[in-house]
Each structure stands twice: as C-alpha cells, then as structure tokens.
Image (tube, rainbow, N blue to C red):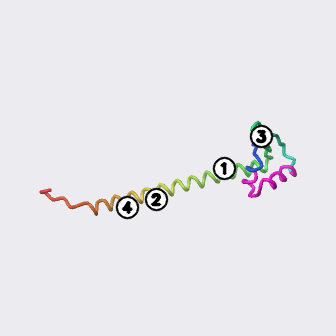
Amino acid sequence: MPQIWMTYNEIADMLGCDARAARTVTIQRSLDRKKSRDGMTRAKLDAELTARFVDAIRNADAAIDEAVRDLRMLHEMMRGSWSNTAIADAPARTAAG
C-alpha cells in the first residue's frame, strides 16, 4: 500500500470540510503526523482514506476525459459550421473571374 501524506487543507478538500475538522479527523483516527521541511504538518492516510483518495483521482480522470471529449466534439462542430459558412459566403466564381 502506498504512503500518502497530506496537509490538513488537502484532507479537508478531499473530505469536504474545513482544515480544523480535517485535523480533528486525523487525531481521532490516530494518523501519523509530521511537520515537513516546508513547515506544513502532514498526516499519513490510513487504508480507508487512501481508498477515498484513489477513488477521487480515478473520478477526476474520468471527468477530465469526458471534458476533453466534449471540447473535441464542440471544436469539430464549430469547425464544420465555419467551413459551411465560409463556403456559403464565398463569392461565386465564374469562368471569367
């Protein structure tokens, strides 16, 4: 199992609470905590929180993939619309032209 260390703010974002509540959760769960070189305290996630973190990453990837697909489809639609408009707006060429 990987070790994932997160700040209270990162845990709060994942749990949908504030940093103070995230700190309380880490204390209640007796998670290992340490102060990093950057001065931020980080807690090592237990198995349940690690599973939540991994699920969040998987869901984020799926949401990003869906957004990319939607943008590509919109791009193709706009490109096709522009091409059709450009052709319709182009002056008719004649043999003399």
Residue 38 occupies which quadrant of the picture?
top right
Amino acid at dot 4 = Ser
Quarter of the figure that contains the N terminus = top right
Amino acid at dot 2 = Leu
What residue did someone put label 4 on? 81
What residue did someone put label 2 on? 74
Label placed on residue 72: none
What residue did someone put label 3 on? 39
The segment highlighted magenta reads: 11-28
Amino acid at dot 1 = Ile
Q: Pointer 2: residues within 10 angstroms few (<14), some, or many (20+)?
A: few
Magenta segment's dominant SS is helix
Is disc 2 placed on a helix, strand or loop?
helix
Task: Verify CB contact (< 8 Å) between mark 2 and mark 1.
Answer: no
x 60%, y 53%: residue: 62
Is disc 1 placed on a helix, strand or loop?
helix
Q: Earlier in the sequence, mark 2 or mark 1?
A: 1
Eye-nearest disc, 3 or 2: 3
What residue did someone put label 1 on? 57
Q: Report x, y in % for residue 18.
A: 77, 56
Is disc 3 placed on a helix, strand or loop?
loop
Distance from label 2 to label 1 (Cα)? 26 Å
Q: Report x, y in % for residue 5.
A: 76, 43
In the rendered image, the residue lying farthest to the top is 37
Q: Is residue 31 left or right of residue 79?
A: right
x 84%, y 46%: residue: 31
> Is 95 within the magenta?
no
Amino acid at dot 3 = Gly
Distance from label 3 to label 1 (Cα)? 26 Å
Q: Earlier in the sequence, mark 4 or mark 1?
A: 1
